[in-house]
Amino acid sequence: MQNSVKIFVKAMRGEFKMSMMGEFSFFLGLQVKQSKEGIFVCQSKYCKDILKKFEKEACKAVATPMSTNCYLGANEAGPEVDQTMNRGLIGSLLYLTASRPNIMFDVCLCARFQSCPKESHLKVVKRVLKYLKGTISMGLFYSDFAGCKFDMKSTSETCHLLGSSLISWHSKKQACVALSTAEAEYIAVGSCCAHVDQPTT
């Protein structure tokens, strides 16, 4: 593997002016931590910047990004809020969903009412900020093949989208030991399809 990397670097340097800056760790707000266990991607620095920009550094953290009794509509009562500020906040949160799919549904729901946002809409968006305050270090962990060193099983991780909105996801250790990365991916795809085909009641 290392030899292949050296060959690639040599070929690239023959065509372009470039220098090796070491292991990839930060790019456009994405923080990448690589280890033997896998790759962890998060946006904790970007998340802190959002909280600071919108003056929510000292806010009280909440356990969920949206309350269970929240029902937003286009014709909400109450005063209107600054559209520019509201759009800037939603845009910042949309970029954060690159490593935080657990806020995708809430942010996309709030984005539907950007043309004439009311105070009730902004309240929901601010709740997402409060949720982020308590979950700054959360991100996505990409485990390698046979990631569990105890039983050598891989982990299936799937996300289910309806349009551009995340509706469900799961991360579960596979029931059997895969003999190759291709088999591990095949098992993950099969698990994903099984969740999609489940009947609704």
Image (spheres, rainbow, N blue to C red):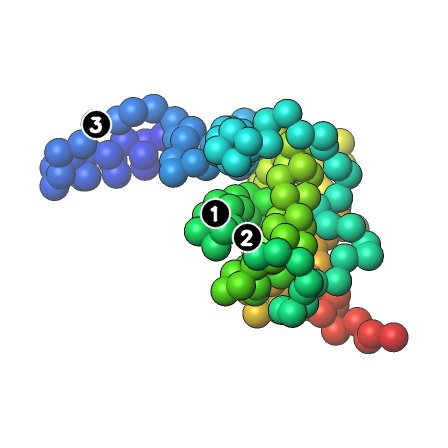
Q: Residue furthest right?
A: 201
Q: Helix, strand, or loop for circle 2?
A: loop
Residue located 62% across and 61% down the image:
109
Q: Position of residue 170 (x, y in %)?
A: 72, 52
Quadrant in the picture for residue 192: bottom right
Q: Which numbered disc covers residue 19?
A: 3
Q: Helix, strand, or loop for circle 1?
A: helix
Q: Quadrant of the N terminus?
A: top left
Circles 1, 2 touching at the beta carbon (< 8 Å): yes
Q: Nearer the viewer, mark 1 or mark 2?
A: 2
| Residue type, label 3 | Ser
**Mark 1 crowdedness (10 Å alpha carbons): few <14, some 14-19, many ≥20:** few
Q: Which numbered disc covers residue 85?
A: 1
Toward the viewer: 62 or 141? Answer: 62
Q: Position of residue 27 (x, y in %)?
A: 38, 36
**Mark 2 crowdedness (10 Å alpha carbons): few <14, some 14-19, many ≥20:** some
Q: Which residue is under mark 2?
A: 81
Residue located 67% across and 50% down the image:
124
Of pointers 1 and 3, the one earlier in the residue sequence: 3
| Residue type, label 2 | Val
Q: Look at the image and tell me whether residue 31 can be seen.
A: yes
Of pointers 3 and 2, the one earlier in the residue sequence: 3
| Residue type, label 1 | Met
Q: Nearer the viewer, mark 1 or mark 3?
A: 1
